[in-house]
Image (cartoon, rainbow, N blue to C red):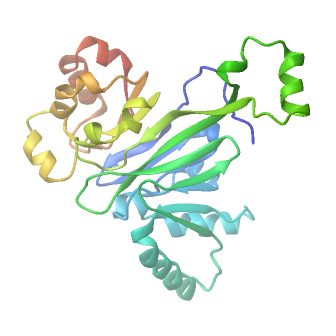
Amino acid sequence: MSQPREPGALLEVGGISVGGIETSIDVPALKLCFDLGRVPDVAVTRGLVLFTHAHMDHLGGIAWHCATRALRGMAAPVYVIPRGAQAGIEALFAAWRDLDRSELPHRLVPLSPGEEHRIHAGLVARAFHAPHTAPCQGYALIFERKRLREEFRGLAQEQVRELSVSRGVEVTEIVRSVELAFTGDTRPEILEREELLRGARVLVIECTFLDDRVSARDAHRKGHVHLDHLIERAQLLTNERIVLTHFSARYTAQEVVRLLDERLPPDLRRRVVPLL
């Protein structure tokens, strides 16, 4: 599979995310999504789903997704999951197979923070720890490309070919770039801990609470990010685009936009997109 985007273009992000209700983050160009609290129509077409943690609003749709793909004659899905959730998810599918009298074909790929799953030759997903009230991990989508090693860049094409073909010299190197990182549910200190987030071109991060209806202290206790936390860490948010997700259902879409407009520094606000 080639990288399905124009060079330099940012990956688009869609889906739905309402704190405590449902989250499913879609990356159309890569035909994958993160989490399935429930299953939006487009998510049924995604054969690769990366799960952050086992809270119901992030994992509750997994069996329905699997069964619906089987019903429609689609390929068995691949589910990347936190390694610690493997036994529970296997037990969940065993129960549903018994109840539903169906095979529910799928493949589980358990990962721990720091481990990677190769999606295709030019793309890997790397798991990282996300501090939350339950074991949780985010994922960085890392693109790989080959480039000529620096010491050979001044040579003519024929000379490079001679070195590579005739002499067996390795003239290229792999360059990695974090194109997108998704935190899942998390506390704000993840921004200090995870360099992958700071280096991502697109950062998808939860921001469950936006004002004093829930304090920043209480948000942290609940395992979530408050807008105050992001404002305090504005210097760490150097990403080209920042997608905020997981807003509490207490906020209307209009309130979300108004509060971001009123409270974020102008440079940061220009790069922030709320997933509404």
Residue occupying image coordinates x 26% and y 53% = 131
Residue 256 shows in this picture: yes
Which of 136 and 272 lies nearest the eye of the viewer? 136
Residue 276 shows in this picture: no
List the single residue furthest toward the front. 167
- Relative to residue 3, is residue 59 depicted above or below? below
Q: Is residue 67 left or right of residue 250?
A: right
Q: Is residue 111 left or right of residue 124?
A: left
Residue 248: horizontal and vertical position, in percent? 24, 44
Q: Quadrant of residue 202?
A: top left
- Relative to residue 147, is residue 3 depicted above or below? below
Residue 198: horizontal and vertical position, in percent? 37, 31
Which of 205 and 190 lies nearest the eye of the viewer? 190
Residue occupying image coordinates x 68% and y 25% = 149
Residue 155: horizontal and vertical position, in percent? 79, 13
- Relative to residue 103, is residue 212 depicted above or below? above
Q: Quadrant of residue 267?
A: top left
Q: Is residue 119 left or right of residue 165?
A: left
Which of 9 and 165 lies nearest the eye of the viewer? 165
Residue occupying image coordinates x 67% and y 40% = 122
Q: Pick the quarter of the image with the C terminus.
A: top left
